[in-house]
Image (spheres, rainbow, N blue to C red):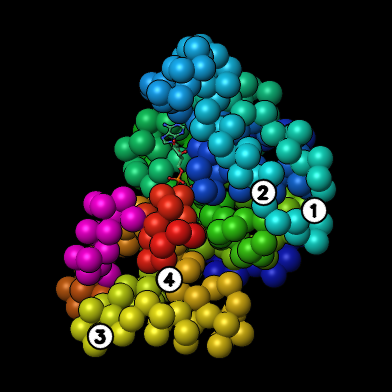
Amino acid sequence: IKTQVQSVQGKPLHIKKAAVIGSGVMGASIAAHLANVGIPCYLLDILPQSLSSEEENKGLTLEDPQVRNKLATTALKRLGKMKPAAFYDPSFVERITPGNVEDDLRRIQEVDWIVEVVVENLDVKKELLAKIEKHWKPGTIVTTNTSGISIEAMAEELSDEFKASFMGTHFFNPPRYMKLLEVIPHPLTDSTLLEQMVAFCEKVLGKGVVLAKDTPNFIANRIGTYGLIVSMQEMRDNGYTVDDIDAVSGPAMGRPKSATFRTLDIVGLDTFVHVARNVYEQVEDEEEKQAFALPDYVQEMVRRGWIGEKGGQGFYKKI
Ligand code: NAD
């Protein structure tokens, strides 16, 4: 596999409709990006299991559509608040149809691309892919937005036909603004489909595609996670503060929005811990492994629910 693709000769895949599964930080934003370039999409998530007291007081039931699609609706509200990008199309929200995995997964038969964007956990992803395969229309491309879990491991129990249509499409946060996209095939990915997908991502989604090998955390997160954990370790060992690190990594470096810990609060510390663990567990060299060892205070923050913007507090308060 070449490590970088500047341009691809193949014709872009023709995607008329898509399904995004997982409506969290990334899923909602990927759906927004697709809708914004004119592709209608389903945005499916798991069912909320119980009513809040506010919903009970309003006389709502679990069957009420407003409750049924609570997670997706929350995501849609967030999409509505996103600042316009240069290519912003205000009608994009109408192209997103929220739903839940339990009732609406059969809808994937109507789409040309299914993108899995659920929590960074191999077992959860494998279980979902097995469900997707039951409704899957042969030929439909299926991709995962994993930050670094092995694509091959994720697909190991699926049929060879499904595997041929499966690969990683790793968007960066926030997907509507970040140009980089890693595309990660595995040994059974159909090579023509791979070329067509790369062409689609470049020409239709406007991305700068880098083809990555299926190694732990691929390219960007292997390097990025390393840098972040070293920053965290240096803070612990040398007494640097969050402000010190952000002062030298953000605006002062000409990157107004990408200071280290501001970025981590946007990413979500719970997701980051999964991503760090993924590479820590798979690296064999002991010295290299220690570079991926998360300080205890980061694990403690996650235990306390200080997971960043989506939890209301992370390295920064009241975001
Ligand atoms: P998140 O925690 O914000 O959202 C995950 C969503 O998945 C939640 O809404 C949850 O309800 C839903 N979910 C869980 N199990 C499900 C299931 N079985 N079926 C349907 N929905 C289910 O996480 P996120 O930050 O959006 O990350 C999603 C994926 O994208 C992960 O693989 C992550 O590593 C990757 N990723 C995240 C970032 C980032 O900056 N946060 C960047 C690139 C890639």
Name the residue: 59% across, 79% down: 255
Label 4 vs label 2: CA separation?
23 Å
Q: How many numbered circles does the render carry?
A: 4
Where is residue 102? Give x, y as percent. 47, 19
Q: Secondary structure at mark 3?
A: loop
Task: Classify residue 305 as left or right of residue 147.
Answer: left
* Amino acid at dot 3: Gly
Few, some or many C-alpha atoms within 10 Å of disc 1 (few <14, some 14-19, many ≥20)? some
244 to the left or right of 88: left
Determine the CA span between mark 1 and mark 4. 28 Å
Badge 2: residue crowd in 10 Å (few <14, some 14–19, many ≥20): few
- The span shown in magenta is 292-306
Q: Residue 36: where, in percent of width, then height?
A: 76, 46
Q: Is mark 3 within 8 Å of ligand 1?
A: no
Q: Residue at x 52, y 28 (%)?
A: 70
Label 1: state its secondary structure: loop
* Type of amino acid under label 2: Lys
Which residue lies at the image location 60% right of the left edge and 77% below the top edge? 256
- State yes or no: discs 4 and 2 in contact (Cβ < 8 Å): no
Q: Position of residue 203 (x, y in %)?
A: 78, 56
| Gap between marks 2 and 1 measured at Cα | 12 Å
The amino acid type, in three-letter code, at marker 1 is Tyr
Between 253 and 138, the one nearer to me in the picture? 253
Q: Which residue is mark 1?
A: 88
Q: Which residue is mark 3?
A: 239
Q: Amino acid at mark 4?
A: Phe
Residue with the mark numbered 4? 261
